[in-house]
Image (cartoon, rainbow, N blue to C red):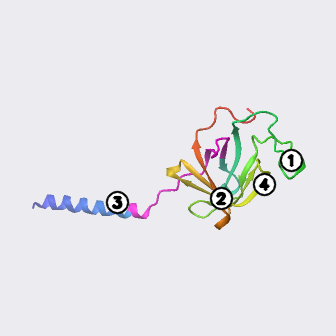
Amino acid sequence: MSVVFRRSAMSAMVGLIGMAIGAAGSRAAPPSVYGFWLTDDADAIVEILPCSANNPCGRIVWMREQGPDIRDVKNPDAKLRSRPICGLDLLGGFQTNGSGWVNGWLYHPDEGKTYKEVSLTVRSAGTALTVSVGGGFFSSSETWKRVDAPSTRCGR
């Protein structure tokens, strides 16, 4: 084996080891929760964006049923029942746990209820969002689908 070949082989081996160590030490960032999400019943699109302290919050930006009569009529606060659902703040208060977002709240206008202990987990290479409420036996979840920004939005 020639000296040149051995040096080239050694250089290649050192380079491969360096790349392997670098790849093992770096993790890809998890897919972003920010963007537009179609709810599991396909009735609304929620835009999730960074709010206070860069924690996610979300609001309804598109609804299948549109019109001035779609109001927050089931809200327990009588003063809020006349507000439109389209454009409504729907979720917030989250903290990161490193792999997702936890300890948030979600307002469900169809029920007039605000749920606590809500978590958001992005899955399927960033194309699906699991929205979970509660934990343990009494938990429930929905899967929202990532979509492009709607061509028409609430109030536009």
- The tally of labels here is 4
Q: Earlier in the sequence, mark 3 or mark 2?
A: 3
Q: CA distance from mark 3 to mark 1?
A: 58 Å
Magenta segment = 22-47
The answer to whether the residue labelled 3 contacts the one labelled 1, judged by CB atoms less than 8 Å apart, is no
Residue 70 in which image quadrant: top right
Q: Which residue is mark 1?
A: 80
Residue at point 67%, 44% (across, down) = 46
Residue 49 in the magenta stretch? The answer is no
Q: Which residue is mark 2?
A: 140
Q: Position of residue 29 (x, y in %)?
A: 51, 56
Asked if 94 appears above or below 70 in the picture, the reply is: below
Q: Earlier in the sequence, mark 2 or mark 4?
A: 4
Q: Position of residue 96 (x, y in %)?
A: 62, 62
The answer to whether the residue labelled 1 contacts the one labelled 4, judged by CB atoms less than 8 Å apart, is no
Residue at point 27%, 63% (across, down) = 14
Mark 1 packing: few (<14 Cα in 10 Å), some, or many (20+)?
few
Q: Left of 27 or right of it: where is 49?
A: right
Residue 152 in which image quadrant: top right
Residue 43 in the magenta stretch? The answer is yes
Nearer-the-camera pick, 124 or 65: 65
Q: CA distance from mark 3 to mark 2?
A: 43 Å
Residue at point 87%, 52% (across, down) = 77
Q: Which residue is mark 4?
A: 113
Tag 1 secondary structure: helix
Q: Earlier in the sequence, mark 1 or mark 4?
A: 1
Amino acid type for the residue under numbered disc 4: Lys
Name the disc covering residue 19, or none: 3
The answer to whether the residue labelled 3 contacts the one labelled 2, judged by CB atoms less than 8 Å apart, is no
Q: CA distance from mark 3 to mark 4?
A: 52 Å
- The extreme left residue here reads 1
Amino acid type for the residue under numbered disc 3: Met
